[in-house]
Image (cartoon, rainbow, N blue to C red):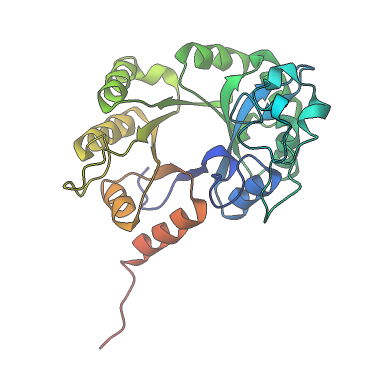
Amino acid sequence: MTADHIVLWEAHRGGGGYELPESTPIGFEYAWMLGGIPEADVTATSDGYLMSLHDGTLGRTARNLPSDLKDKRISEMPLADVRRYDVGSDRYPEQAVPAIEDLLVRLRNDRRREIIIDYKSAPLEKLAGLIRKYGAERQVTLATTDEEVAAHFRKLAPEVRIKIWLGGPASRIMERFDALKARNFCGFEQIQLHLNDRRDPRNPWRYDLSPEDVRRALEATITAGVLLQVLPWQFEKEDLFAILRLGVRSFAVDYPNKFCLLAAEYFSSGWPKPIR
């Protein structure tokens, strides 16, 4: 990670969910068209189909969902029922929940594309088998906060990259980070740190993790040959610029277009200025 450019950026929840509806066909295409890597959360239906849906239910994202289905688990619904409901928006309607297999087809059709699959609940053996079926091992990163899940999946699909994400209070994040560092990050390729707002208007640095925490984590991962990624849940220009100045070059974001525009502004600052 020596070049001064964005090595990797991830569209959280398959496109963010703020600029476009989350985990939808249009959201995934949006992320790919912007040059990012969308994230697909994986869960299973009652008839065994692996779906890209963050929640265990359709209650938050589906439009015109009958009240008796708002709390019904996806694991209790067959594919046909899950696909019956629109998870789009007024501007982008008629969006069905994508199956993981739908996304892997897109990877097979364009080997330049990649995807991050965030494990929620699904048979790991089936997920590994689908990835092998489409020859997408080198296009997929499995994300999880559970090191046992990650270790098991590494045995099932050794060519798939593994990302461990660390969330919660800053002290807990750094405690887990240091434990992973002591074990050489268990051979996993990526570590993601959540940047939660600290809500202190007196401090220009808005996040719970301090700049020193991020800098220390970056130095440790570079030494180990591991990619460090941060997920700033909210950011404005000054926030993103402050993270970039620390040397971070991998992000997960809920606002892909906003991120791209601000990153372009940051990296354009060193170009020649008009002669006055």
Residue 78 position in % (x across, y down) = 80, 22
Is 242 left or right of 134, judged from the image as shown? Answer: left
The quadrant in which residue 65 appears is top right
Residue 124 position in % (x across, y down) = 64, 15
Measured along the vertical axis of the image, is residue 83 above or below residue 264?
Answer: above
Counting labels gives 0
Measured along the vertical axis of the image, is residue 41 above or below residue 267?
Answer: above
- In this view, the residue farthest toward the left is 202
For the point 30% across and 31% down, the residue is 223
The quadrant in which residue 131 appears is top right
For the point 27% across and 24% down, the residue is 174
- In this view, the residue farthest toward the front is 67
Measured along the vertical axis of the image, is residue 37 above or below residue 220?
Answer: below
Measured along the vertical axis of the image, is residue 151 above or below residue 139?
Answer: above
In this rendered view, identify the residue nearer to me: 111 or 49. 49
Quadrant (top left/top right/bottom left/bottom right) for the N terminus = top left
Is 240 left or right of 28, judged from the image as shown? Answer: left
Is 32 left or right of 214, judged from the image as shown? Answer: right
Work out whether residue 37 can be spotted: yes
Work out whether residue 112 can be spotted: no
The quadrant in which residue 194 appears is top left
Quadrant (top left/top right/bottom left/bottom right) for the C terminus = bottom left
In this rendered view, identify the residue nearer to me: 68 or 48. 68
Residue 270 position in % (x across, y down) = 31, 66
Is 249 left or right of 19, judged from the image as shown? Answer: left
Residue 14 position in % (x across, y down) = 59, 41
For the point 76% across and 17% down, the residue is 48
- In this view, the residue farthest toward the bottom is 276
